[in-house]
Amino acid sequence: MSNWGFLKNELDSNDFVIDCRSQALYEAGTIKGAYYFPFIKKAFGSDNESQKKMLGHLRGIQSLFDSESKTRIIVFDEGMGMFAARMVYLLRGVGIKETYMLSKRWPFEADLEAGTKIMEFEPIDKAKQINGVVDKAFMEKNLTRLQIFDTRTKDEYDGKLPRMTNPEQGTLCGRLPGAFLWDWTTFFNSEGYIMDKSIFTKRLQGFPFMPERTTVLYDYNGSRSCLLALMLKEVGYQDVSTYQGSWFEWRKSSLPKQAVSLYGVTNKTTAAPRVGGSERKS
């Protein structure tokens, strides 16, 4: 049984269910009545147009949820992974607090059917800030004052890979200045389930971090960082946000970077001056 508040162990007949696996797997067979929202797999910048698109999808889900008079939203993927966490974090960010991840690994026992509820929504007219999500302008203004976690893999953090999967030759590798590494793959135990809260808290106490300090998490496209954000919020971190644009957006800017290299072109890295903090890994 899970001891994390953002995880639920069972489905209820009155749940609004969201499948965050691939669209092909969803169409082949999903939980009866489950929805699929393709936007959750995509990278979004933090500019106004990107925020309008992101909020259009989130408000669309909120409207569907309200119209069906369900009591809570349950999100699942192959195994409590990045996209389920991202969906939960973002929906909570627009006010749907009763949103949870299912603490089971697929396949699990349930009434199944071919998935047909694939939904996309139009952007909203005016960009609004999602609670717990910051933009590039915020990062640039506050960079030297932030406590930053990089939740990518060590190879990405060290500037050897631009992203975890399907890296493209010539893509810029690197990290945000002053970021601490906390590889998201270490959040899971040997059986593939999210680690016990007590173990997570113990590991966190070994780092020189302050729960009251403004903390921002990022990865490549704003997905992996959402799981750590949910975990940190639950163990007492008071000011936690994700940087939605993440490395996908930052690498295209003229803002400072560390461990810079071009994937497939050179293995040499260029270290920019550190802006506080030190390398850490759980």
Image (spheres, rainbow, N blue to C red):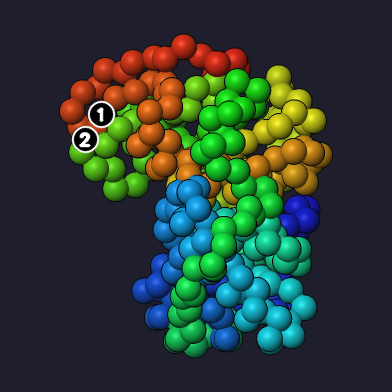
Left or right of 143 in this view: 272 = left
Q: Which part of the image, by quadrant, shows the C terminus? A: top right
Q: Secondary structure at mark 2?
A: loop
**Residue marked by disc 2:** 170
Count of all numbered marks drawn on residues in the image? 2
Residue pictured at 47% horizontal, 56% vertical: 50
| Residue 92 in picture, x, y percent from top left | 70, 60
Left or right of 32 in this view: 237 = right
| Residue 230 in picture, x, y percent from top left | 69, 49
| Residue 78 in picture, x, y percent from top left | 50, 63
**Residue marked by disc 1:** 262
Residue 267 seen anywhere in this rendered image of the structure: yes
Of 28 and 87, nearer the camera is 87
Of 233 and 146, nearer the camera is 146
Above or below, 61 against 104 in this view is: below
Q: Quadrant of residue 72?
A: bottom right
Residue pictured at 43% horizontal, 36% vertical: 250
Q: Amino acid at mark 1?
A: Leu
- Neighbourhood count class around disc 1 (C-alpha, 10 Å): few under 14, some 14–19, many 20 upward: many
Q: Amino acid at mark 2?
A: Gly
Residue pictured at 74% horizontal, 38% vertical: 239
Residue pictured at 25% horizontal, 29% vertical: 262
Of 262 and 54, nearer the camera is 54
Above or below, 199 against 52 in this view is: above
